[in-house]
Image (cartoon, rainbow, N blue to C red):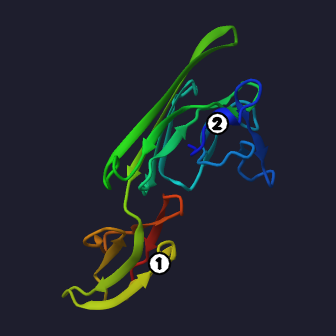
Amino acid sequence: MTREDLAGCTDEAGTVPASVVQNEPDSEMQFVFGKVSGLSLICFLTPDETGEGSCMVSEVDEGFSEAGFDFSSDGSTVKMDASVNVVPGQEEELCFFNPVFRTLSGQVFAAPGDCMAVSAAMNPPGSTVGQTLRDERKHRENGMEILDETTVNIRINAVRRPLEIHLLQFSGTHELLKREIFMPGTVPEQLEPLAEAEYLLLETVEENGEIPRREVAGRDVDFLNTMSCWEDGICLSHAHEIVWK
């Protein structure tokens, strides 16, 4: 997903070729599409080291709040679902959904895709809009014709920008034991409540929000999620493990 139209960045074939960056032999591959910036959601199967099986190669940028992949047993059918949390601006902005292709020889490239307009007027907080990309291609393998089908569903969730995050700890008698205030993106990955705490209250103070967004976590809950946002409105989801004493 990009904020710019790839039509102005393509080569003679009308595509944007990707270069592969791999810092170490065992590290994950990253695909760089020239000077184009955006969010990448890439997933494909490739033969493993033995040549008898296959392994999955994926790249999911942190701007995606959720991402899931589903493959058929032979890899011919691929389904991807992803969500992006966005704080819409007052002015209308375009989001381009550009399909990424991988040839049988291993080359990866992006092609200009359709766009969707997003703004505060059209996309109030809590609303969701989506785009679905589909592709069908045939290839021959061991003398047989195989149909490859790919479906990518991307959802844009309109949210309010978080301003402050309050973490409150309560006893079993609802006595406030501790209150902490964090800026978005600074909440520790691991939360260690006091031994006498029976539940947590997570409050998120949001821009233009009348009351904080609240979430309660008792001792049967092991994780809480918070959110922080980039300047361009794209929000990151952060998971925090709760270590109860």
Q: Earlier in the sequence, mark 1 or mark 2?
A: 2
User: Could you tell whether 54 is left or right of 220 in the image?
Assistant: right
> Whole-percent x and y of residue 232?
53, 58
User: Relative to 5, is 208 on the left or the right?
Assistant: left
Q: Is 54 placed left or right of 214 in the picture?
A: right
Can residue 139 be seen in the rendering of this structure?
yes
Q: Is residue 195 visible?
A: no
Q: In what quadrant of the picture does the C terminus appear?
A: bottom left
Task: Find disc 2 in the rendering and name its residue.
Answer: 6
Nearest the eye: 134 or 143: 134
- The amino acid beneath tag 1 is Met
> The residue tagged with tag 2: helix, strand or loop?
helix
Does residue 132 appear left or right of residue 62 in this picture?
left
Image point 59% across, 32% down: which residue? 99
**In x, y percent, where is residue 115?**
50, 36
Residue 49, image x, y percentages: 76, 38
Label 1 vs label 2: CA separation?
35 Å
Residue at image mark 1: 183
For image coordinates 37% across by 53% down, the residue present is: 120
Q: Which mark is residue 11?
A: none
Q: Residues within 10 Å of mark 2 (few under 14, many from 20)?
A: some
Mark 1: give few (<14), some (14-19) or many (20+) Cα within 10 Å: few
Which of discs 1 and 2 lies nearer the camera? The answer is 2
Residue at x 78%, y 48% (from the top left corner): 21
Nearest the viewer among 185 and 51 is 185
Find residue 215 and report its image quarter. Answer: bottom left
Coordinates of residue 213 in the picture (x, y in percent): 29, 69
* Secondary structure state at the residue bearing disc 1: loop
Residues 114 and 144: in front is 114
